[in-house]
Amino acid sequence: MTKQRQIITNRVAFLEKKIPIYASFLGLIGLLAIWEIICSLNLVSPLFLPAPSAIVTTGWEMLVSGEIYENLVPSLYRIVMGYIIGSIFGVLIGLLLGFSKWADAIGTPVVYSIYPIPKIALLPLFILWLGIGELSKVTIIALGVFFPVVINTFSGVKNVDPILIKAAVTFGSSPFNVVRKVILPGSLPMIFAGLKLAAGTSLLLLVSAEMIAAQNGIGSMVLHYGNLMITTKLMVGVIVLSLLGLTFNRLLQWLEYKLIPWK
């Protein structure tokens, strides 16, 4: 019996053992090593797949020359503005749809009927309405962010325990306080799920919009060097986009940890 308990204890200890931080980088390091070996053996033409070392060298040159900075700044402006605007309206409308039966009955069919439309298909229309400047690009990103956020916020409100809402109303809380102190905190996990989903959508729309209707930006840079078949600089742009998406994801995780410490 003692031996069996010891076996169970060892298994539990193994399952609870913390994985070292460096383990998260092993897969990435292994992939880069294999990639470098394949390129160094000339198994693939550098035109189609440049070596990681060549990409790093080219990226450093573009960073020193300021080319990355010149394209990154307008991209950051577009995605940050679009993301913030879309998120704010998405949360507000989602709370309204979830809290008000009239708003739910009127607004939910509209949201679900427009949501399946590929947002990038509306870019030519926004350019016609708003011009080819920054406003049309920010608007298309905001629209793409709005729908995942509003749908997740709406779902989060609907999943709040109704007993908590009834208790707050019974104790005399106003509708505003019910939303602020009960519904909003209870909906935060789903809201952040929508925000994370919207982050990927915003990056996709940013690149698409810049490839179609922009003279600068990371998406425009990637398209430009793709047309010129300068693969190393194209890959630098792809890596910058990847780092941008990773940064957004980590920032949202940090914000979620601060706002939802009980999760």
Image (spheres, rainbow, N blue to C red):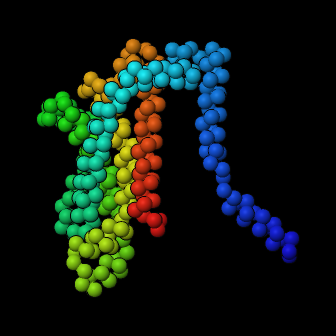
Residue 230 in the image: state x and y as whole percent. 44, 15
* Relative height, residue 219 to residue 79 (above, below): above
Residue 123 lies, in percent from the top left, at: 23, 34
Query: Where does the image place residue 235, in percent across and percent down from the top left?
Result: 47, 24
Residue 117 in sight here: no
220 sits to left or right of 1: left
- Confirm whether residue 213 shows in the render: yes
Q: Residue furthest left?
A: 129
Q: At 25% across and 69% down in the image, what residue appears? A: 99
Q: Is residue 125 above or below residue 200?
A: above
Q: Which of the pair 155/93 is nearer the observer?
A: 93
Q: On the rendered structure, is 78 left or right of 23?
A: left
Q: Quadrant of the N terminus?
A: bottom right
- Which residue is depicted at the point 23% across and 64% down? 96
Which quadrant would residue 156 be assigned to in this image? bottom left
Residue at 34 percent across and 41 percent down: it is: 202
Query: Against 254, is 234 above or below?
Result: above
Residue in the foreground of this view, choosing between 52 and 169: 52
Is residue 232 positioned above or below 115 on the image? above
Occupied quadrant, residue 168 = bottom left
Q: Residue at x 32, y 32 (%)?
A: 73
Which residue is the extreme one toward the front?
64
Number of labels in the image equals: 0
Q: How far across and how far down the image is residue 111, in percent?
A: 24, 53
66 and 186: which is toward the camera = 66
Q: Between residues 106 and 192, which one lies in front from this camera angle?
A: 192
Q: Is residue 8 found left or right of 129 in the rendered image?
A: right
- Farthest residue, direction bottom: 171
